[in-house]
Amino acid sequence: MDVINQLPSPEALLEELHRVVSKPIRLMVVCGTHNRAILRYGIREELPDFIELVAGPGCSVCVMPTGHVDAFVKVARQPDVITATCEDLLKVRGSKESLADVLNEGVHRVEIISSPRQALELAYVEEDKIVVYPAVGFEATAPSIAETILEAAQNGVGNFCVIPSIRLLPPTIDALLLDPQLSIQGLLCSDHINTISDTEAYADLARKHSLSCCIAGFEKAEILQGILSMVKQIHRGESMVDASGAMVYSMEETARARRVVEEVFFPTETAWRGLGSIAESGFVIRDELALYDATKRFNVRFAEGTDQCMCHCNEIISGRALPPDCPAFGMACTLQNPVGPCMISNEGICAAYFKYKLESSRFSRLDV
């Protein structure tokens, strides 16, 4: 089904938004890809003044705490290790160094890949090396990572392992919504959350916090339709999830994805940059698959830290500041010379804000 062709035009949706909104509304844009699309399309400038959009913690590289990056660097320097990582993660600094520093030293190999499957393929070729994959992402990435680990186990591939750094958004959003300063009334979520969680976790959040929620795609009309849906829900006093714009997975696909994830991982408390430790917001690998857990294999722990940095990424991640509030933004911190993870990552709100140069007054700002 082609959802886009069934939607009204962006112009018609904007016209209706201007007609129906009648009171101040603050919505959280959970996903980094949504935030980037909103800036690219100039949506903030076109919305009614009553509507504020707050950027959420939906960039997996941006929310990676320094202790996890330190673990990536430590493992990368182990003998006979090849680190296979996404490019976004390369320049994110830990307490002192980044994987880019390891790469530039020229002593240990760091390879840029785009999927866990590519890391495993590298392990098949490099039989005399241990290929380590820093598994950074949200719950939607968990099935592919779990499947890769299971394939390695089934084929007896002993020179492949993963640093588990997957994060779960619903528990974290739940924690953020407890902050009365944010006063969030709705959540705009990406249309791939159905992979393992379907909509139930977000329905629970809607009921608990009396807010609206909409799952939408990344085209302009899809985003505007999602915002309009939430505005109408809020005006009607409804707390629910509108999943009409979500990607459709069969019950069999969803059940299989959940089984695979549960076979490999179980939830645990984990730390988020700028947000602290949050219960059951991460995954660890089960003991029976410990060979594929690099933290156990190399006896590495995720150290606790304060995530100090020379920018305001911690505040931006939690929706309490916007990029121009940061003294480093556009000065010491640019796309060519990024300082914090929100500028380093392609999904980061600072990178998108800098690239599209939208000085929008509709970015939400809250005192901290």
Image (cartoon, rainbow, N blue to C red):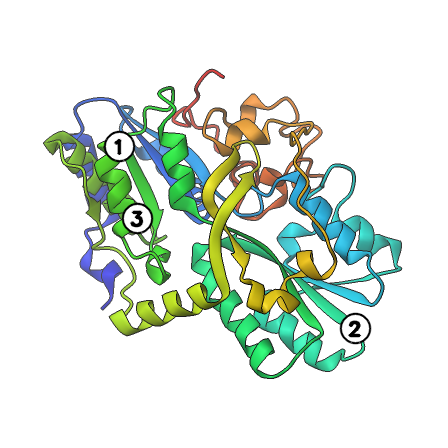
Mark 1–mark 2 CB contact (< 8 Å): no
The picture places residue 346, in percent across and down from the top left corner, at 56, 48
Q: Earlier in the sequence, mark 3 or mark 2?
A: 2
Decide if residue 91 is in sight here. no
Q: Which mark is residue 129?
A: 2
Nearer to me, 178 or 192? 178
Q: Which residue: 25% across, 22% down? A: 24
Decide if residue 148 is in sight here. yes
**Identity, as a three-letter code, of the amino acid under mark 1:** His
Q: Earlier in the sequence, mark 3 or mark 1?
A: 3
Residue 11 lies, with reference to residue 104, above or below; the image says above
Dot 1 falls on a residue whose secondary structure is helix
Dot 2 falls on a residue whose secondary structure is loop
Q: Which residue: 56% across, 68% down? A: 288
Nearer to me, 76 or 15? 76
User: Mark 2 Cα within 10 Å, few/some/many (few <14, many 20+)?
Assistant: some
| Residue underneath mark 1 | 209
Determine whether, in the image, residue 172 is placed left or right of residue 49. Answer: right
**Identity, as a three-letter code, of the amino acid under mark 3:** Ala
Query: How much space separates mark 1 and mark 2, taking CA atoms?
Result: 49 Å
Residue furthest left as drawn: 236
| Residue underneath mark 3 | 201
